[in-house]
Each structure stands twice: as structure tokens, then as C-alpha cells.
Amino acid sequence: MADRVNSARAALDTIKTRMEKARRRFGAPPESVELIAVSKTFDADQVRPFLEAGQRVFGENRVQEAKEKWPGLRETFPDVELHLIGPLQTNKAREAVALFDVIETVDREKLAGVLAEEMSRAGKRLPCFVQVNIGGEEQKAGIPVDEAVAFVARCREVHGLDIVGLMCIPPDAQPAGPYFAQLAGLAKLSGVENLSMGMSGDFETAIAMGANHVRVGSALFGRRDQI
Ligand SMILES: *Cc1c(COP(=O)(O)O)cnc(C)c1O
């Protein structure tokens, strides 16, 4: 176990050093960029060393998987902050509200309505991000770019959601910088403060474009066999 905690700590240090360099280059205030450790596909035993090493903010993309993994880990680490970063079906909204602390993938009217209902039923008001389909890709989730600003406003005014930021996954195999810059522009227009963008391959670019939440999986935990 000690060995695994040491290697988790080394992996965290490496990523945080790279984040810090990018942050300084961008000129953002210290401590302003948060690392979300994306633990999808890795089981509780593989995640625990990262908790022992001090990491507290994690991302999962599937409700069912999070439900199997996190309640047990939370018993030992009650101060964990869990982000839902994958697509959410409305029939899973109740479970998502029970399991997660932040929902990053609000991307359509019906989901916004159901989440608002489930939060009020649970007596919670979770911070949420609106996911934007920044590359306009058919296979990707997210609200279309040209509807994003109005959608944020409706989530707030009609549904009463606490929208704190925008999130995106840019197209593969293309420079991500312009997409990140575009999301930053949309955040300004929408009046939200937080930008969740950047993964293992491009988190430094994302920070240079204003990201203050980066979602890093494989660079911390190693290669995934499944998506
Ligand atoms: C898997 C995933 C990540 C992490 O990807 P890596 O390339 O492993 O860092 C980030 N964001 C989302 C939405 C993901 O599904």
C-alpha cells in the first residue's frame, strides 16, 4: 500500500507541477486551477492510493459505476468532492443527485427540469456546469454553441439551477486551443465564472485559455482498457 500511495503522490505531483507552470504562464492567481482526477474504469482499490495521497476531487462519467465505487470510499474520506462528467439520462437524475456533488453535464432543457425537481426533492442545490458541444459534433453531447448563452439563462431563471460554469470536450485530432478560447468567450457572455476543459493530452493548453477545472484521467491513473 505504501508503494502505491507513493506512486500516486508522484503522479499527482507531476501533473500539479505542469498545471502550476501553465497557470503562471497564463497569469492566473495561485491555487485557482482545480485538478479533477478522472477515475472512471479504475476500481476502488486503484483509487484509494490517490485519496491517501491527498487528492479529494474526482470525476466519474457513469452513475452506475460511481454508485458501486464511491459510497464505500466516502466512508473513509467524507470530504471527497465528486463530479459527474458523463452524459446523464433523466431516469438516472435522482441517483446522480444523491451521489454527486457537482453535475458538469447539463445539456438540454428536459434534463435541467428533472435535475431541478430532484434537487428540490432532496433538499440540495448542487453546483452545475452546462456542457457545450463546442465542435458541433453529432456524436457528442452538449448544447449547440449558438444556444449556449440562452440555455444558461433558462437553466437559471426557469429552473433555478446553480449554473457555475461551462464544460466542453473538443473534437479529437484537431488543435484544441481555438475551441477552448471559444468556450471561454461563451462563459463571459453567459456570466459564468468557471471553465471545465482540458484532459490528459491538452490540460496545459486549456489552462492557457482560462480553464480553472481540468479533468485528468490517464495521465494520473494510467491507460484505460475501455472508455
Ligand atoms: C475520460 C474523460 C476525461 C479524462 O480523459 P483523459 O484523457 O484520460 O485524461 C475527461 N473528461 C471527460 C468528460 C472524460 O470522459
Image (cartoon, rainbow, N blue to C red):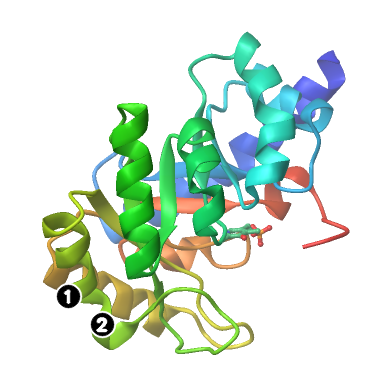
| Of the pair 42 and 199, the residue shown nearer to us | 42
Residue 211 visible in the current orientation: no
Q: Which residue is mark 1?
A: 150
Q: Quadrant of ligand 1?
A: bottom right
Q: Which residue is mark 2?
A: 147
Location of the N terminus (image quadrant)? top right
Q: Is residue 92 left or right of residue 117?
A: right
> Mark 1: which secondary structure?
helix
Q: Position of residue 37 (x, y in %)?
A: 59, 42
The answer as to whether callout 2 falls within 8 Å of ligand 1 is: no
Q: Residue at x 37, y 29 (%)?
A: 122
Q: Is residue 220 left or right of residue 88?
A: right
Q: Residue at x 62, y 42 (%)?
A: 14
* Disc 2 + disc 1, Cβ < 8 Å: yes
Image quadrant of residue 171? bottom right
Q: Position of residue 133 (x, y in %)?
A: 43, 79
Image quadrant of residue 167? bottom left
Amino acid type of the residue that numbered disc 1 sits on in the rendered structure: Ala
Label 2 CA crowd tier, 10 Å (few <14, some 14–19, many 20+): few
Separation (CA) of disc 2 from disc 1: 6 Å
Amino acid type of the residue that numbered disc 2 sits on in the rendered structure: Glu
Q: Position of residue 70 (x, y in %)?
A: 66, 28
Q: Residue furthest top?
A: 76
Label 1 CA crowd tier, 10 Å (few <14, some 14–19, many 20+): few
Location of the C terminus (image quadrant)? bottom right
Q: Residue at x 57, y 27 (%)?
A: 55
| Of the pair 145 and 14, the residue shown nearer to us | 145
- Above or below 105: residue 170: below
Q: Position of residue 94 (x, y in %)?
A: 49, 41
- Above or below 59: residue 132: below
